[in-house]
Amino acid sequence: MDSWLKNLSDEQIDFICNELRFSKEDLYSMDEDMLYDKVYDPMCDIEIAEIPSDDSEETEHCRNVSEIVTVMGNKFAVEE
């Protein structure tokens, strides 16, 4: 799965680890199913919770989550 995680920047990896309280070793040891369940799904939940319901601007935190969800979602879609 190491090659799969190369689709994310170092900053995005750090963000995921900080947000979801994983070590990098934990993250890199996950298989695709675990990445989907333990990273992608929770990040989607965070994105949904943080997207403004009005016309206000997204926070930087929300933009970071959205970028990660987009990269991961695109990769999962390609693999299916």
Image (tube, rainbow, N blue to C red):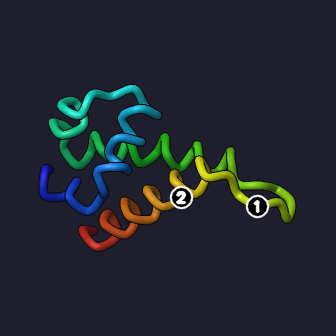
Few, some or many residues within 10 Å of mark 1 (<14, 14–19, 20+): few
Q: Quadrant of residue 31?
A: top left
Q: Where the C terminus falls, by quadrant? A: bottom left
Q: Which residue is the site of mark 1?
A: 57
Residue 21, given in percent of the width and then of the height, sits at: 39, 26
Q: Residues within 10 Å of mark 2 (few under 14, many from 20)?
A: many
Tell me what residue is drawn at x 53 percent, y 50 percent: 44
Task: Tell me if residue 52 comes above or below residue 26 in the rendering.
Answer: below
- Figure disc tally: 2
Of all residues, the one furthest to the bottom in this rendering is 78
Give the SS element for disc 1: loop
Q: Nearer the viewer, mark 2 or mark 1?
A: 1
What amino acid does circle 2 point to? Ser
On the picture, is 60 further left or further right than 34?
right
**Position of 1 relative to 7 (above/below):** above
Residue 39 position in % (x across, y down): 38, 42
Specify the amino acid type for callout 1.
Glu
Q: Residue at x 15, y 36 (%)?
A: 29
Q: Residue at horizontal 22%, vertical 30%?
A: 26
Are the residues at dot 2 and dot 1 in contact (C-beta closer than 8 Å)? no
Q: Is residue 14 left or right of residue 57?
A: left
From the viewer's perspective, is residue 31 above or below residue 23?
below
> Which element type, helix, strand or loop, lies under badge 2?
helix
In the image, what residue occupies the spot 39% across and 41% down? 16
Q: Residue 49 in the image: state x and y as whole percent.
A: 68, 45
Q: Quadrant of residue 4?
A: bottom left
Q: Tell me the distance, in whole angstroms, between the alpha carbons under discs 2 and 1.
A: 13 Å
| Residue named by callout 2 | 66
Looking at the image, tell me whether mark 2 or mark 1 is earlier in sequence order.
Answer: 1
- The percent position of residue 28, horizontal first and vertical second, equals 18, 40
